[in-house]
Image (tube, rainbow, N blue to C red):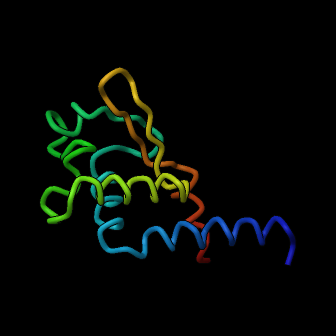
Amino acid sequence: MSKSLDKNIDEIAEMFKALSNPNRLKIFLRLLSCCQPGISASVDDFRNSKGCACVGDLGKDLGIAASTISHHIKELRRAGLIHMERRGQKIECRIESEALTGLKNFFP
């Protein structure tokens, strides 16, 4: 196996590992339904116009603590699935489109 393919497999494995947790998968799917990959959405976009929860409220109906939600979001970001950026008091996030492409293209 080439080093390039090994690196790609390692990245994909990290994504699958992050998504293997049911709560992280739910959070990821919620983010995916709220914003298009590669396009940032602010906290207010989630709350007001998209009908989705803001970053701080993503797991409210999951019955888990805010600190646990924060951990899950951090793991999704670490795996390269999402990108988060603070703009003042708001947090903007987006699904990493390259990650989705990699996941889609992994299985022939």
The residue at 82%/64% (across/down) is 4
What residue occupies the far top of the structure in this picture? 88
Residue 2 in the image: state x and y as whole percent.
87, 72
Residue 11 in the image: state x and y as whole percent.
64, 65
The residue at 60%/68% (across/down) is 12
Residue 15 in the image: state x and y as whole percent.
53, 66
When asked about the image quadrant of residue 26, the answer is bottom left
Q: How many marks?
A: 0
Residue 19 in the image: state x and y as whole percent.
43, 70
Q: Nearer the viewer, residue 104 or 19?
A: 19
| Left or right: 51, with 76 as reference point | left
Q: Relative to 23, does residue 57 appear above or below in the rendering? A: above
The residue at 38%/57% (across/down) is 71
| Left or right: 5, with 34 as reference point | right
| Left or right: 99, with 6 as reference point | left
Q: Relative to 8, does residue 34 appear above or below in the rendering? A: above
Query: The N terminus lies in which quarter of the figure?
Result: bottom right
The residue at 32%/60% (across/down) is 29
| Left or right: 14, with 87 as reference point | right
Q: Relative to 25, does residue 87 appear above or below in the rendering? A: above
Q: Nearer the viewer, residue 50 or 62?
A: 62
Query: The C terminus lies in which quarter of the figure?
Result: bottom right
